[in-house]
Amino acid sequence: MVVEQPVFRVLGPLQVWGPEGPLRIAGRKPRLLLASLLLDANQVVSSDMLVEVLWPRVQPSSAVANLRTYVSSLRSAGVQIVAQASGYAIELDADRLDALRFEELVTMARAAGRTDEAFEHLRRALALWRGTPLGDLPASPLWDGRLRVLTQARLAAAEELAELKLARGEHAGAIDDLRALIGEHPYREDLWQRLILALHHSGRRAEALHAYTTIRRQLVDELGIEPGQDLRDVHASVLAGDPAPVTAGDPPAALAAAAPHQLPADVPDFTGRAADVAALTQALSAGERPPDGPPSIAVVTGPPGVGKSALAVHCAHALRAEYPAGQLYLCLGGTETTPADPLDLLAEALRALGVAEPALPLTLRERASLYRSLLARRPMLVFLDDAADTAQVRALLPGHGCAVLVTSRRRIAELPGALQLELDVLAPEESEELLGKIVGAERVAAEREAAQAIVHSCGHLPLAVRVAGARLAGRPGWPLSVLRQRLDDETSRLDELRAGDLEVRGSFELSYRRLPGDAALALRALGLLGSQSVPGWVADAVLDRHRSDTVVDTLVDANLLRLAGTDPVGQPRYRLHDLVRCAAKEKAGAPTIDGAERHALVRVLGGWLTAAEHAATRLPTTLFGLTSDGAPRWSLERETLGRLTAEPLAWFDAEQDSLVEAVRLAADAGLAQSAWGLAATLVPYFDLHCRLEEWQTTHRVALDSARAAGDRHGEAAMLRGLAQVCVYQDRYAEAGDMFRRARAIFHELGDTRSEAISICGLAAVNQFSGRHLRALGSFRHALAMFLAIGDRSGEAYARQAIGRVYLSLRDVRQASRWLGDALRLAEELGDAHREGCVSMQLGRLYDLVAESDRAMRSQGHALDIFEALGDRHCGAYAMRNLGGLQVARGDRSDGSDQLERSLVIFQQLGDRSGEADTYQSLGELYHSSGRSVLARHYLHQAHELRRELSESFA
């Protein structure tokens, strides 16, 4: 069995592609390592050089070992790296690395001379470039030489391709290429010379003279020199009116007169889309297809306003010279209430081909036959704009020899052999460039931040950017900040994006009105759900039925809903473009108004709550969880629910942003019980992953919602949750105040368990504030309440907490008694997490009485439990404790490894307090071993972190 090897791309952002698609290489240092090896593929790169690239400032003592670890991680991802005595190498052929393939194609082109073969090799070579090589990685001086060679080779190849285009008479293509090169090298006189000649030879004499004026002004004003003799000679030749040469490709005059040239005008400020232009022009090029072969077909699809027609028109103009027999243009009216009839469209095409009205056949079949016969004699470029569906397009396909370019808002995937090009919005820098072309580059440069905010509010949608630009162009006295402020408000954004006959709302309306009723409801409801991607089951909840895949497919096929990818638990995710979402939300109305959309929102929130509760019960720790019994639930299919939450941590990771947004949505809609129920259900996950910011955000939003609704239970639950966050942040005064308020409300409501939980929180505040005896009294009080209601999990926690206080008081006998009771109870309950927590405390106890073996066994047992449960946070504390014990026993190497590992986890989880304490331990370790430089580094890090923590909580 042959295993397909990954393909690497460095001529742009670093990418690795495997048989199933892109391979993710996580972490900056593994990516830097891979990039260094790929730049010198098939050569050994020394370990010293790799260390310099990965650690340019301070190289750790474990650098070589870490390098081996990163090599191992890349091998695990499918990258084959060969180890040599002095370093490492990646061995691969040119087909697996774009840089090698580029150099190979350029070499082949030069060997072929000035031929069509050379032209094709150069075109394919330059198409491999996607941007600045390795532009997504921090630059390393050690890469400069290799990157300089690649960049210079690209420039030379681009110049050679432009020369070949000029020689072939493809002046328009050569002009575009030369302008792009001049943009990169504005003072290269030889490039300007070629541009002026190309413009002159294509009959654009005025533009040629203007080009000379431009470069001369640049040279004189900026460099203080006149153009060179060659450039002046070219200028004189144009001024003298020397005739432009006629190329072999020019059609006879009689044929040109009879040929239809119906293409709409090209977009003068067309911007970006280089890869799409290259793909379309290659697919439809006459040279890519045998004369008697089937027609070349390309279908451009995308959402409203994304620029499908603009791209198609631009590419069609680039291909005109290859289709001298003519270019047909037909508007199919796919977004109209009644799309154009193929019978009428064929009549329009036949008239353009010279068929007189009386000679038009009557039936669709006869007209299609005549249409194919005429095009078989005169191969043309056929542009079918705004197609409604496949059936409409199929009736207009030529038999052979032609190229067909189709645009549609709907996916048209049933045409055999067609290139399917789905457009997305412009890249941020491209949308900013487009805005600059419309309103003036100087104006954009003067208010760069406002310009970026405007195109962001436009969602980088070309139509929206064009409308925004038109409004600004018509108001030259406006600062860009005026429009920026107006676009900030989503509720009125669509009102602002209207200029003359250009309107984003109207463009959306054309697609919306063709939706069936259930799809239209789904779209309106999705508009209420915010900007986060959502899983497919959300549509089930919206429509209150399972397996609504056909409705989702309808919205996806209409390019109103976009597939945003597949999350780690394997479910497809969908997202509305920001402006489509604004339009859908506008259609839905306010979520507080009772109607189909509000009921749909309630069901979606109920589905989130049901799924989150189901996943939360499977997390390692669910102690002290609070639920909103009055919040509506909506049940997913049992099989779907079980599959999605089979790995609860992975599910929460995938859905975290959506769940946080769901709390906000519920609060905004006045659904207080749903808001605080979701917030409370998220606590075990937030606690496990130290997501204190999200914990605090959701609880504050839900607290305000509960208070506004007069929901006392929700108010108390959110106060208790916020108080716990304050405990983790060492803000004990605030924590105590909120625990007391929560306790009072729970007592008033008669909720004994929740009151006991709040008392435990007050006890913890007292303990961490040094008031140990008061803490003991509170924990004993809570224990009595847990015993009274038969809550054995609460009892186990309280017994452990009492033992922990005694341990702080160094009362070994009492600590041993209470911790022993807690351990036995945890084992009886099968509560592995509580067992791990108690084992950590027992490890501290045994260390206190100098029983180091038992201490290490207890900490090791705790670590094993937490790792088995997937609790990296508690595991990091056990790991740190174990490392400290190992250091104390003289095992500095293993001890420092454990401390370093725990430090990485604290950093990944954002536990800055744990990070600071571990830095301190490492600093003290290295100080005692005489490694003063390393010790100062770690101790300084500990000091800075604690200073930042104290300032942030001040």
Image (cartoon, rainbow, N blue to C red):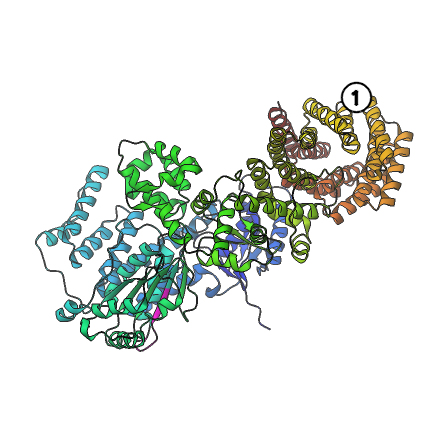
Q: Nearer the viewer, residue 135 or 685?
A: 685
- The main secondary structure of the magenta stretch is loop
**Amino acid on which the number 1 mark rests in the picture:** Arg
Q: Specify whether 764 is left or right of 373.
A: right
Residue 546 lies, with reference to residue 586, above or below; the image says below
Instruction: Check if residue 613 falls in the magenta segment.
Output: no
Q: Nearer the viewer, residue 270 or 792?
A: 792
List the single residue furthest toward the left. 240
Q: Residue at x 25, y 62 (%)?
A: 165
Q: Is residue 51 visible?
A: no
The spot of residue 940 in percent (x, y) is: 63, 29
Q: Specify whether 243 is left or right of 112.
A: left
Return the residue at label 1: 771
Q: In what quadrant of the picture does the C terminus appear?
A: top right
Q: Is residue 750 visible?
A: yes
Magenta range is 290-298
The spot of residue 39 in percent (x, y) is: 47, 55
Q: Quadrant of residue 751?
A: top right
Q: How many marks?
A: 1
Tell me if mark 1 has few (under 14), some (14-19) or many (20+) residues whose alpha carbon lies within 10 angstroms of its own. some
Q: Nearer the viewer, residue 942 or 262?
A: 262
